[in-house]
Amino acid sequence: MKLNLLDYNRQGLEKLFTDMGEKSFHGRQVFQWIHQHGITDFAGMTNLGKALRVKLQSQAEIKQLDVSYEQLSEDGTVKWLLKLSDGNCIEMVFIPEDDRGTLCVSSQVGCALNCDFCSTGKQGFNRNLSLAEIISQVWVAVRQLSKLSGKHDRQVTNIVLMGMGEPLLNFDNVTKALEIMMDDLAYGLSKKRVTLSTSGVIPAMYDLAKVSNVSLAVSLHAPNDELRTKLVPINKKYPIAQLMQACKDFFKDEPNRQITMEYVMLAGINDSDEHARQLIEILREVPSKVNLIPFNPFPNTQYRRSSNNRIHAFRQILTDAGLITITRKTRGDDIDAACGQLVGRVNDRTSRSRRLKVKVVTENAA
């Protein structure tokens, strides 16, 4: 089996080439050809000697993910379904705005955390994505967007690991992918333009702070343990007090940076004035800003989106208390590309999706 060179960060490629008896700088050259120039044919890597190109052709390949389909929203959002070699599928989304273009990337096939309001979490979990499968999403998006626009200027200016899966449960592959995203010989994004979103895997948050300076978002969604455990079950293992301490520690050496607290607005569940006051209290000493996310519905969910008036009132309470608060604009919901709607196609090893279907059928029969 040939080695897929997308499975290596720059340091990994340098080591691979020395292990092959070649100079390490050839690893840097190939790395740049792949990610900056989008070249997948070794014959086109013109600054490599012919013998090396022939050697690479026999031992390695650059195999990106296949696009099964592409959907374009009325608001310009693009969603891709990407097929994996094992038959599973993942989704990624590109959101264009006036001042940026944000690519939402997946880290797992499905998700093991089973958050109650998230369509992705309800489909179950199959496996972690490899490094090649994570970074291939970026590679594919850059090229697909060029085809759509007919331009070769930079359209992906920001990347968020907010797609399918919990990134910190795929730590090694995710952190290597982050390195590639920020590498000047690859995509060259700054630390403020790459954001990892976590539901609060606290030990991995401390590990991440040691190896990466990316931006951090936390899927909070509730201001007290009882409610958060219902909405985000991992809270039972890592309750809010511990999570807030981990957040305070994350940027302790960079006091000017803030963590984004993601808070999905669920009508009658977590959107009362009292919930807002509780949120203010738990964030009092945490360097943070709040991102209010209107709930995006999916089939068979019990939840409803908070009204615009309720979201505005909730936001005003936070703002009056001095918290920087924004309301996320819903994008791509006409193609199920909005936050919490990504589902892909997952061979669920947890059998959760099958159990849920049985439950729904039973309830409907009753």
Image (cartoon, grey):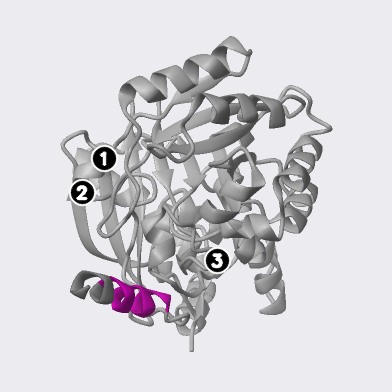
Residue 355 x/y as whole percent: 37, 79
Pick the front one: 28 or 108: 108
Q: At numbered mark 3, what does the secondary structure look like: helix, strand or loop?
A: helix
Residue located beneath label 2 in the image:
335
Question: For the point 19% across and 75% down, which residue is it?
Answer: 365
Identify the mark at residue 354; answer none if there is no mark: none
Residue furthest to the bottom? 1
Q: Earlier in the sequence, mark 1 or mark 3?
A: 1
Q: Quadrant of residue 57?
A: bottom left
Could you tell me if the residues under marks 1 and 3 are in contact, i.e. CB atoms within 8 Å?
A: no
Q: Which residue is mark 3?
A: 131
Does label 2 or label 1 sit earlier along the sequence?
1
Q: Which residues are magenta?
A: 352-360
Q: Amino acid at mark 3?
A: Leu
Residue 357 magenta: yes
Compared with 232, 18 (above or below) is below
Is disc 2 in contact with disc 1, using a CB cutoff of under 8 Å?
Answer: yes
Mark 2 to mark 3 CA distance (whole Å): 27 Å
Q: Residues within 10 Å of mark 2 (few under 14, many from 20)?
A: some
Q: Amino acid at mark 1?
A: Thr
Q: In the figure, 23 relative to 270: above or below? A: below
* Residue 274 left/right relative to 16: left
In the picture of the structure, the residue carrying the numbered disc 1 is 77
Viewer-nearest of discs 2 and 3: 2
Closer to the chain start, of discs 2 and 3, is 3
Q: Nearer the viewer, residue 189 or 316?
A: 316
Please indicate, yes or no, whether residue 89 appears anywhere in the rendered image. yes
Q: Give 263 or 313, whichever is nearer the viewer.
A: 313
Left or right of residue 282: residue 229: left
Please give left or right for residue 169 compared with residue 186 in the image.
Answer: right
